[in-house]
Image: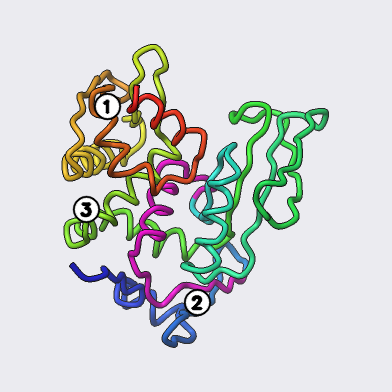
Amino acid sequence: MGLETFDVLAALPPTYIRRYVRSVDEELIIVEGTSGGKRFRDILPRYIYFDQECSYNIGLWLGDRWGGKSRVGIKNKDVELIDAFYWFLRKKMKQDNPKILVIKKSSNITIEPTTTINLPTTPVEVIENTMFGPWIYAVFVQNGALRTKVMNQIEQSLRAICDSSGEEVAASFMAGLLDAEGGCEHNKKRVTISVSLRKKSGNFEFGLYAYLLRRLGVKFFTVRDDESIVLRIPRGQLPVLVDKVASKMRCSRKVSLLQQWAGG
């Protein structure tokens, strides 16, 4: 199969193009306008090529997205994932100014600086009543057009993109999702993916994840209640999961644990 390409300009509504698009070339689309009484100027990629790096980071974003309708970003405590998404925004999404934050519950909490990955200088945003626990990393760009006109459209097209792409792209997407959203049940030595039914995209996400696991030959079972669906991958399936997905994951602590469980 060839490399799937998402044509951003073709996905924009004609009325949006007439009203906001100011210039187009082979790499970039420039949009300008007014929203909420404020002027904006956003940059969009002309094309998005669904190679393994792109697919991984889309999975990462779908599992750990952060920032609302005007941002494209993720939050996570693993700096490897922040690093991956930072460069995805720079290289694949053509964004010059991604921001990296440390969101802290209290100014008294000290975060040890990382020396393992060469992240840019990290400003600190202090949030006193955060739902994210004592602290967490975040990386994002402030770009409403990228969120609503590109990322949301990609999300709705993911099944079709995966259908027309090779297994390596599907495995890379699952690797990003597991890095972001995969849980490890230590007592059973199995992997879980939890999908909230309180959000509108819950059933869509469950269907997509189930489809991808089946395509990769990974067996699972589900547990459902009124608020969520949990996909559980039993220990006996971990050798298959590790063989197909682990080499594409970036979260070293999860990879180490999965390899240990699969081998034991």
- Residue type beneath disc 1: Ile
Residue located beneath label 3 in the image: 159
Locate residue 224 relative to residue 19 in the image: left or right: left
Quadrant of residue 262 within the rendered picture: top left
- Residue type beneath disc 3: Arg
Dot 2 alpha-carbon crowd within 10 angstroms: few under 14, some 14 to 19, many 20 or more: some
The picture places residue 228, in percent across and down from the top left corner, at 31, 25
Q: Which of the two discs, 2 and 1, sits closer to the camera?
A: 1
Dot 1 alpha-carbon crowd within 10 angstroms: few under 14, some 14 to 19, many 20 or more: many
Element carrying mark 2 = strand
The picture places residue 211, in percent across and down from the top left corner, at 18, 42
Which is more N-terminal, label 3 or label 2?
2
**Region rendered in magenta:** 39-68
Residue located beneath label 2 in the image: 31
The picture places residue 145, in percent across and down from the top left corner, at 47, 65
Residue at 66%, 46% in the rendered image: 116
Mark 2–mark 1 distance (CA, rounded to whole Å): 44 Å
Residue located beneath label 1 in the image: 233
Element carrying mark 1 = strand
Kindly check if marks 3 and 1 are in contact, taking CB atoms under 8 A apart as contact.
no
Element carrying mark 3 = helix
> Hey, which residue is sitting farthest front in the picture?
263
- Residue type beneath disc 2: Val
Locate residue 254 relative to residue 79 in the image: left or right: left
Kindly check if marks 2 and 3 are in contact, taking CB atoms under 8 A apart as contact.
no
Residue at 37%, 70% in the rendered image: 48
Please say if 188 is above or below 106. above
